[in-house]
Image (cartoon, rainbow, N blue to C red):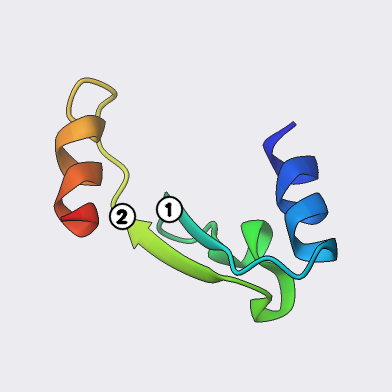
Amino acid sequence: KQQSVIQQLHARKGRLIVMCTKGDASVVCPGGSCRAIEVPAVEDCLQPVINIIPLQ
């Protein structure tokens, strides 16, 4: 579902900034069609803490 939303926004010429796990940027943004913020994969309980740092 998220992939289809990304495709729709890309088709409408939206500027996308996507946060994803390291190594997933090529899957989420094929061909460098959007900017990706890659964060390390950690336990589920720590993921919100890791995600908030690049957003500040």
Viewer-closest of 35 and 24:
35
**Mark toward the start of the polypeptide (1 vs 2):** 1
Image quadrant of residue 15? Answer: bottom right
Q: Nearer the viewer, mark 1 or mark 2?
A: 1
Residue at position x 47%, y 66% in the image: 36
The C terminus, quarter of image: bottom left
Residue at position x 43%, y 53% in the image: 19
Outermost residue toward the bottom in this view: 32
Residue 39 tag number: 2
Residue at position x 65%, y 65% in the image: 29
Viewer-closest of 9 and 31:
9
* 53 to the left or right of 51: left
Viewer-closest of 8 and 44:
8
Residue 19 tag number: 1
Q: Tell me the CA gap for discs 1 and 2.
A: 7 Å
Residue at position x 72%, y 69% in the image: 30
The N terminus, quarter of image: top right
Tell me residue 47's x, y (percent).
25, 33
Which amino acid lies under the numbered mark 1 shown in the image of this protein?
Met
Tell me residue 14's x, y (percent).
68, 65
Which secondary structure lies at badge 1?
strand
Relative to 8, say whether 45 is above or below: above
Which secondary structure lies at badge 2?
strand
* 17 to the left or right of 7: left
